[in-house]
Amino acid sequence: MLKSLSQAVSTAVRISTTTMFSARALQPLTRSTLCSPNSGTVRPFTRSLWMMSQNGAASGYRPKLFSSKGLIPVSCGCGSLHTEGDKAFADFLSDEIKEEKKIQKSNTLPKMSGGWELQQNGTEAKLIRTISGEKVTITFNVNNSIPPNFEEEAEQAQAQKSAENEPDIVSSPNFVVEVTKQAAKHSLVFDCHYPEDEASHGEGEEESDIFAIREVSFQPEGDVEWKETAYTLNTDSLDWALYDHLMDFLADRGVDNTFADELIKLSTAMEHHEYIKFLEDLSGFVKCS
């Protein structure tokens, strides 16, 4: 009798425990359980903040989460960002353009003597001349054509001279000379540059060359892509007699010191003109005009 009563009590306890566990399992998880640091799964909080304010979407309330200090309201209708910094930048560019136009020597490019025809495409230019059936083409680009000023020299010079006595900016570009004969299959190409020291290649010369030949090669005529596999003669280790003949070859076709000096003047005027145009385009972009 006692044994039967004991089994009945044990059965009742198990049923009660099972019922309580089931009720706890069916109870919905609270937000504190989901967000608890000790919880096995942390749910990211992604709901918009305005939904939690007042009546949410029904109220039409949209809190301003981020401030826009320093921003100027768009008034030109371009839909772009305008800031106080943009306004200061535009004012600076306007003054810079005025100053550059003041020092611009001429609105037109200087002419080259010797009957050279100028063809310009942006920063690139070609000078073309025909002599007794030979076509001579000079190609150069004013980009990166201004030699950099060394910091030490600039600091020393700044202490000794005023702004009025500052040296003019000079553009001395690398240029390519292409000589084409009617009966030849290829053009003879000279890669030339302005050396910094303008050293002479011969002793006892009255006038040193202001430009130098860096490389010589044969290349296809015209706008055909040049072959990298063509032999290129580098003049660094070239016999001086052969080098002098190459320079005389160019001089006979109008590429001499006079030409090189005029090319510097032309390139300098072109570079300054492109610089002013760039400032004007930059100003228009910043002001969105």
Image: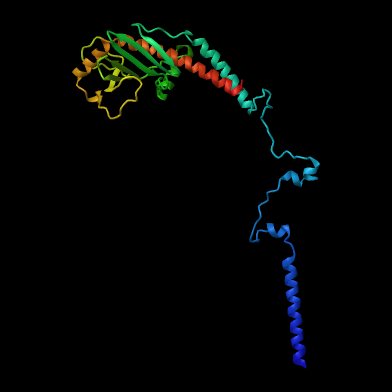
Relative to 252, residue 222 above or below: below
Q: Which residue is depicted at the point 76% across and 81% down?
A: 12
Say whether residue 167 is visible: no
Q: Which quadrant holds residue 253? A: top left
Q: Residue furthest bottom?
A: 1
Q: Name the residue nearer the viewer: 249 or 183.
A: 183
Q: Residue at x 43, y 15 (%)?
A: 120
| 98 lies above or below 217 | above
Residue at the spot 32% in from the left edge and 25% down from the top edge: 226
Q: Quadrant of residue 17?
A: bottom right
Q: Quadrant of the N terminus?
A: bottom right
Residue 287 visible? The answer is yes
Percent coordinates x, y for residue 238 in the rendering: 21, 23
Which residue is at a point 51% across and 19% down the rendered structure image? 278
- Give the number of marks: 0
How is the rendered protein coloured? rainbow
- Relative image position of residue 43 (x, y in whole percent): 66, 55
In what quadrant of the picture does the C terminus appear?
top right
x and y percent of residue 152 in the render?
40, 24
Q: Is residue 16 left or right of residue 166?
A: right
Q: How far from the left and from the top, in percent, is residue 24?
A: 74, 68
Relative side of 29 to 139, left or right: right
